[in-house]
Image (cartoon, rainbow, N blue to C red):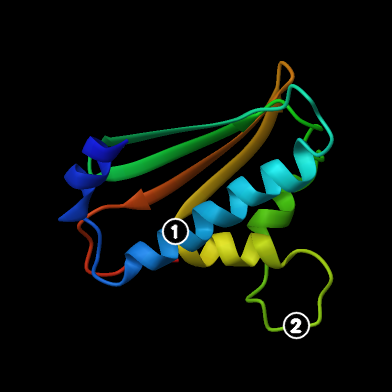
Amino acid sequence: MTDLLIAAANEVVAGDWILLEIGLAEVVNNAIEYACAGMADGYVTLRALIDDGTLTVDIEDNGTPLPADTQSKFDNAGDMSDVMALSGRGYSLVRQCFSDAWFRHEAGINRVTLSYPLNQDAMAF
């Protein structure tokens, strides 16, 4: 992972490192705190790839299946203006940090794929 981060270092827009860290931490924390809660054999796996000018990060876990409407909730997430909301803020947070995200559950595995365009003057959201 260190080599990947070094390779990406010159490609990430200045100031976006913190956004990537926050967005990634949100997804990984949710996988640990909610999907794998109480599991003795739960796991979370991260994989990252730089290809064709895009940083792609896959987060997988074997925890409680993602709800069927997870992708729809992400796609329709607002702008976090309701600071008192009890749920859903994570979707908005991830939307602000990554250009795209895909959520799915297949063959007993949850997978979240995050995408970030490298070496762009600005991310178009």
Give amino acid for label 2: Asp
Q: Which numbered tag is attached to residue 82?
A: 2
Helix or strand or loop: what does disc 2 sit on? loop
Instruction: Quadrant for the C terminus, please.
Output: bottom left
Mark 1, residues whose alpha carbon is within 10 Å: few (<14), some, or many (≥20)?
A: few
Where is residue 93 shown, x and y percent of the image? 59, 66
Helix or strand or loop: what does disc 1 sit on? helix
Q: Which numbered tag is attached to residue 21?
A: 1
Left or right of 43: which side holds 69? right
Q: Mark 2 or 1, which is nearer the eye?
A: 1
Quarter of the view holding residue 103: top right
Left or right of 99: which side holds 67? right
Left or right of 123: which side holds 99? right
- Label 2 and label 1: CA atoms lie apart by 23 Å
Return the disc, 2 or 1, that comes first in the chain's sequence: 1
Q: Residue at x 71, y 25 (%)?
A: 62
Where is residue 81 shown, x and y percent of the image? 68, 83
Q: Residue at x 78, y 45 (%)?
A: 34
Residue 99 vs 19, above or below: the answer is above
Pick whichever, 124 or 14, lies toward us: 14
Residue 80 vs 40, above or below: the answer is below
Where is residue 11 shown, x and y percent of the image? 19, 54
Give amino acid for label 1: Glu
Left or right of 7: which side holds 40? right
Pick whichever, 91 or 26, lies toward us: 26
Inspect this view and state whether residue 17 appears. yes
Mark 2, residues whose alpha carbon is within 10 Å: few (<14), some, or many (≥20)?
A: few
Inspect this view and state whether residue 124 appears. no
In the displayed image of the protein, which residue is found farthest to the front?
Answer: 40
In the displayed image of the protein, which residue is found farthest to the top?
Answer: 107
